[in-house]
Amino acid sequence: MQVSLNWLKDFVELKKIDPKNLGLLLTSKTAEVDGVIEESSQFENMVVGLVETLIPHPNADKLRIAKTSVGKETLQIVCGGENLKEGMYVAVAKIGAKVKWHGEGELITMERAKIRGEESFGMICAGEEIGIDDPHAGPKDILDLSSLKPKIGMPLADLFEKNDVIIEFDNKALTNRPDLWGHYGIAREVAALTNSKFKPLDPKVKIPTSGESIKVEVKNSELCPRYCGLIIKNIKVEESPDWLKKRLRSTGHGAHNNIVDVTNYVMTELGQPMHAFDKNYIKGGIVVRTAQKNEKIKTLDEKERELSVEMLVIADHEKPVAIAGIIGGEHSGINENTTEIILESANFHPGNVRKTSVKLGIRTDSVQRFEKSLDPNLAELAIKRAAELILQLCPEAKIAGPITDVKNFKETPLKIDLNIKKAQSKIGIEISKKEIKSILESLEFKLKEKTTDIFEVEIPSFRSSKDVTIEDDLVEEIARIYGYENIPIILPELPTRLPIENTERFKKHRARELFSYALGFDEVYNYSFYGLKDLKNCNIPEAGHIKLLNYLSEDQTHLRTSLVPNLLKNFQLNAKYFDSVKLYEIGRTYKEIGEFMPLEEKKIGGGILLKGKTDEPFYQIKGALELFFKKFNIAVKIAKGVDNLPFAHPIKAVSFIGQDGSTLAQAFIVHPEILKNHDLEKYSIAMFEINFSKSLKLEKHEKSFKHLPKFPSIDIDISVIVDKNIEVEKIQKAILEADNSLITSAELFDIYEGQNIEKDKKAIAYKVTLQSIERTLTDEDMTQVQQKIFKNLEKLGGVIRGK
Amino acid sequence: MDGPEVESEYYNFEGLNIPKDHPARDMQDTFFIQDKNDPDHGRMVLRTHTSPVQVRTMEKYGAPLRVIVPGRTFRYEATDASHDTTFYQVEGLLIDKHISLAHLKGIMKEFLSRLFGKEVTVRFRPGYFPFVEPGLELDFSCLLCEGKGCRVCKHSGWIEFMGAGMVHENVLKAGGIDSKIYQGWAFGFGLTRLVMMRYGIDDIRLLSNGDLRFVKQF
């Protein structure tokens, strides 16, 4: 919101203060000020000039050279203005001034220039180039100041009285302060902050005690706590005077006509939105009611609006004429033929105004104020102020009769008990009772001492409509005015207490260490969403997904049920820059399970990408998962194949099954079709997904000690050639089953295919360890076990090498 | 503590003293979930802050309480170099019998000084968040220019860091804690922003697009 310092001064006797410091003061005690802009700064290096001589430009038909006096010096300026003539007073932008070239685009800083070979020391400006209205100028005319009879060399800021300062508030910071949505309330705040005198507004207007008043019927008193209406006759609708237009413009409003401008002026001044109806259009009086089913209204912005039954409208006895607190109807508005008006100054229910505004998609200055919970008392002051201004602008106008005032609000002031000890304890410093009293009184609170520790505080109505309704609100008032900078820095003394363990988070860090440091994966963070295209590319059905109602892009519409789709996009991106990629992510998935809350599970997903066709990534992934489960002490069985993973290779895939029979993780080669969908057909990618939440539930916490072996072990190497399609698992089983008591482990150390081996065969080598807990093994033991192993392997069709 | 990322309107808003049709809802543009509605919990949303965990934790453990909640949060907000739909927040909550704003200043000064490895000053400004009263914004002294004013702190000498304040009595009530006996403060800051500041990262989107040329730098 833009606030004019000059306007504030109407209501506060502001001592001399640097506007920038006032901005900082407001930021530190009231609400964030985004900027403090001095209007005169826009007119820096701009002065009144007198064109002394004017000669044609030797190299350009449409340009002339003007020797222009700017007081102490005379400048040569090249100018294209058609109306330029000798003896004319003009606006000169000297070197360093900032102008808007032809009134468009960014500001340009004037520099010394040569234009078609002639030197030019500035610019003679058109109105639009320096933000001054010049309605009578032709398209190629410059601003003629002769009629103002200005002094040569006078700064333009002085000539146009650009001496205001605009303070820009961050609107969000004013959300809880309905009283600060107009200059009047801000002036009151500034008076308290700077210890200056506040000048209350007392409109000088005589409201007749009898005569014609508008009939008002409020049907929904809860939605309309107050409605003031006033008839004014003999109106002449015309352009507003300059002072009024200037104030509206400097605070970011347009100017329309005197009546509409007055309603906007009062809103900007007091924060109370107002509306003026053409009385001729209102049939039989005002009715404040909710809309009827299928009722429609064409609003001021020329749009037809369909209303629903909970929306509050202002109607006459035939039709709705405005949407209450939001926008007026098109036909009932003020036009140049209007002679009699009805002024409306009302108070509407903040929630209802907001709801209707959101539903219809209309956001106006009025909505912005009503939704903050305005003080109903403001309505009366505002209607009197508007009447005063209208009579000032249209001296022939006549107020027809008394103000119609329908009140449905509590007028007794709110009183809150303030416990001084409690306030001191919350702020953390013992602000004296005397100081607390003086702070609250500066903000127009009234205090009565109830007991030594308790004040009864009466809240002024402009604060009690929303912002100050409980004791803690008073604590805030005390703290901010006392000064947050004066609160000491203290570390609390607290008893030692052991934290509640968050095992999952702690284990997450361990998993991260394992994947990042031990296994050399890079960690990525992906979005929690993906889109339909990603589902399609990964062959994932849409069912079971949680969908966003509102979304920002087509690739963020569904909440992920798997980490894989986004990881695949990571591979797609990184394959451009790296030959091999190893990455993983720890994140949540979200699954619709038919209950209100979806199932959120923490997963670890990842994969390895290598160039060319190879199963190497798969073995690495499988090994990584084996290590993961071993390190977390979670017992798993590896089973062939995966269930319900549409993006996995049908055969080159394994599942890690927990002791309760549930799948804890899956490792797989990405299906060739899915690779193709991601333009990755030239790569091999194996991926995995661990259900981390589920896995941790099966974590074993104890390990039991086994006695160290007393007798030495014997290693035997076994190499066998088998059919290529025989799985390693089967061979391993054949070896282990050869002797349950002596074989303690069988470790695969080589798989070989190629030269010297038949085409459909592979050579597999194992290191088998034998040990007894009872005795030292003999050569005979070794030979016996070896023979049993050979026999088992030969049953699988194996040929033992070196036998 | 942890809490759900797909959260009910009740915990994300009402329980935090942000009723329906309250203008403060504009401050937090929200992603809503399709076809999810519950008479007690309202619609389902992607949590816009980590604050819902405040009420959840109060309900579960009561007072006194010391809680820290890092987590992923979401805003329905057009994306650019400094805004993304997804970011991380850290929520803190301290409730006991005599907890004051002076303690908040003390803890944050200590935390930030340790984080940056040098003495940091903090300041409070008034700020409005419906779930605290008094409500504050907390800034810390710009580390780059040491308070003299530079591009990073927009020539103010201060970095806007977080929202904080004394927990509103309605929030304590929602969490089942007696506000006549217990009081305390809560804060919430953007972890993502802090990371960006710490490493001079100028585009927030780099944090979630999985580009290893970025990831491998850390």
Image (cartoon, coloured by chain):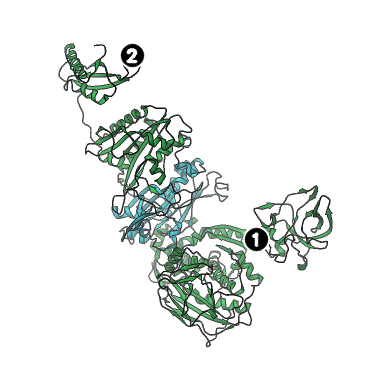
Find residue B34 and report its horizontal and vertical position in percent. Answer: 36, 54
Depicted A675 relative to depicted A361: above or below: above
Q: Which residue is mark 2?
A: A756
Find residue A756 and report its horizontal and vertical position in percent. Answer: 33, 14
Q: Which residue is mark 1?
A: A39
Depicted A428 relative to depicted A303: above or below: above
Name the outermost residue toward the left.
A774
Letter of the chain in green = A
Seen from the viewer's position, the closer of residues A143 and B90 is A143
- The chain under label 1 reads A
Type of amino acid at the residue the image marks with label 2: Asn
| Rendered image quadrant of residue A757 | top left
- The chain under label 2 reads A
Find residue A282 and report its horizontal and vertical position in percent. Answer: 51, 79
Colour seen for chain B? cyan
- Position of the N terminus of chain A, as image quadrant, is bottom right
Q: Nearer the viewer, mark 2 or mark 1?
A: 2
Depicted B136 relative to depicted A457: above or below: above
